[in-house]
Amino acid sequence: MAEDLKITSSTNKKDQYESILPQIEALISGENDLIANLANIAAALKEQFNWFWVGFYLVKENELVLGPFQGPVACTRIQKGRGVCGASWAKSEVLIVPDVELFPGHIACSSASRSEIVLPVYQGKEIIGVLDVDSEYLSHFDDIDELYLKKIVSFIHA
């Protein structure tokens, strides 16, 4: 696929996901390099939604290590169970945090981040990392984000 995205200007979140989803799938299909695919997914999501931060942390030696991302500099390593990313990994579940200030043990990589969604990325039944998305707005993420971001992480193959 050509490395061009058609960004929808719709204010409807579902329409934006419906537009970007097949483009991301096409962008990474046929490419076997995990890092390249994660980088393109992060870039496509950042370009479409203009979130404050979007990227991946990868499981390495029993901790999450910063992977491809778009946005300001970030925490490099996160222990299992720590912060939203570590909790998502430890619990093997999607976490939607409407106000990160109220999340016990939140790791503040940036004080501008106000809400967050984190999804485990699986290879088979094993978690190989997490997709982390931060917004500068409170209560920015919901079930629509969870639904479509789950579809996007299902495209990832290590």
Image: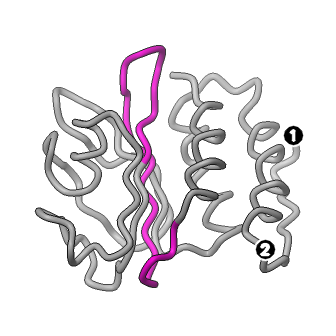
The residue carrying pointer 1 sits among few (fewer than 14), some (14 to 19) or many (20 or more) residues within 10 Å by Cα, namely: few
Q: Secondary structure at mark 2?
A: loop
Q: Residue at x 38, y 72 (%)?
A: 98
Per the image, the residue denoted by label 2 is 12
Q: Nearer the viewer, residue 99 or 86?
A: 99
Q: Main secondary structure of the magenta part?
A: strand
Q: Which residues are magenta?
A: 119-141
> Could you say which quadrant of the image residue 107 lies in?
bottom left
Q: Is residue 96 left or right of residue 82?
A: right
Q: Residue 38 in the image: x percent, y percent?
A: 55, 42
Q: Residue at x 88, y 62 (%)?
A: 6
The stretch drawn in magenta includes residue 131? yes
Which amino acid does the dot numbered 1 rest on?
A: Met
- CA–CA distance in space, label 2 to label 1: 26 Å
Per the image, the residue denoted by label 1 is 1
Q: Nearer the viewer, residue 144 or 124?
A: 144
Q: Is residue 49 left or right of residue 83?
A: right
Q: Residue at x 45, y 77 (%)?
A: 139
Q: Residue 7 in the image: x percent, y percent?
A: 83, 67
